[in-house]
Amino acid sequence: MKKKIGRTENLQNIFEDSNYNPLSIASGFYGGLYCYDGWNNLNFLTEEIINPRRNMPLSALISVPLITVIYTLVNFSYFIVIPKQEFLASEAVALVAFSSFFFYFLFLIFNRIHFFF
């Protein structure tokens, strides 16, 4: 099966056979909280930064939406690169997406690594 990279056919019927149970949705949100866990480390930085009254809210207002957009775009790119069946069967979706998307560049990457060692 030839992989179709960046095709919109992978987005057709993407939510078919989805589980809309509230417990499953809550579990999905709980799993996603790990990506947003850095905001609680901002409290430890108040002694280290200059003008924390201005910089703390500014850092929260910039970082949380920025990480939300990046996280959403990365997950959306997984759906574009990987077909739904392969997405569901994979245990490491990022690895499958990387190998699908950057397949042509892997030779160059590993060739350079071998060159330096």
Image (tube, grey):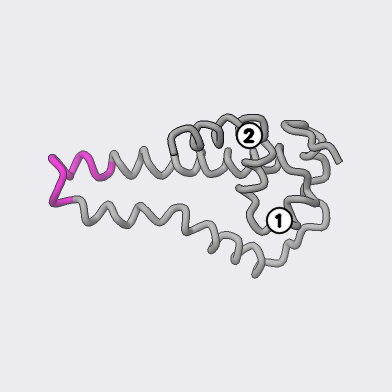
Amino acid at pointer 1: Ser
Residue at 66 percent across and 66 percent down: it is 24
Residue at 61 percent across and 44 percent down: it is 75
Amino acid at pointer 2: Phe
For residue 68: magenta?
no
Residue ID for mark 2? 102
- The outermost residue toward the right is 1
Compared across the picture, whether 106 is left or right of 82 comes to left
Q: Position of residue 60 (x, y in %)?
A: 33, 44
Front disc: 2 or 1: 2
Residue ID for mark 1? 90
> Which is more N-terminal, label 1 or label 2?
1
Residue 31 is labelled as none
Q: CA distance from mark 2 to mark 1?
A: 17 Å
Could you say whether the residue bearing mark 2 is in a helix, strand or loop? loop
Could you say whether the residue bearing mark 1 is in a helix, strand or loop? loop
Place residue 81 in its image quadrant: top right
Q: Position of residue 8 (x, y in %)?
A: 78, 32
Compared across the picture, whether 34 is left or right of 20 comes to left
Place residue 90 in its image quadrant: bottom right
The local crowd at label 1, few if under 14, some if 14 to 19, many if 20 or more residues have their Cα within 10 Å, is: few
- The outermost residue toward the bottom is 23
Residue at 62 percent across and 48 percent down: it is 95
Q: Which residues are magenta?
A: 46-57
Q: Quadrant of the C terminus?
A: top left
For residue 56: magenta?
yes
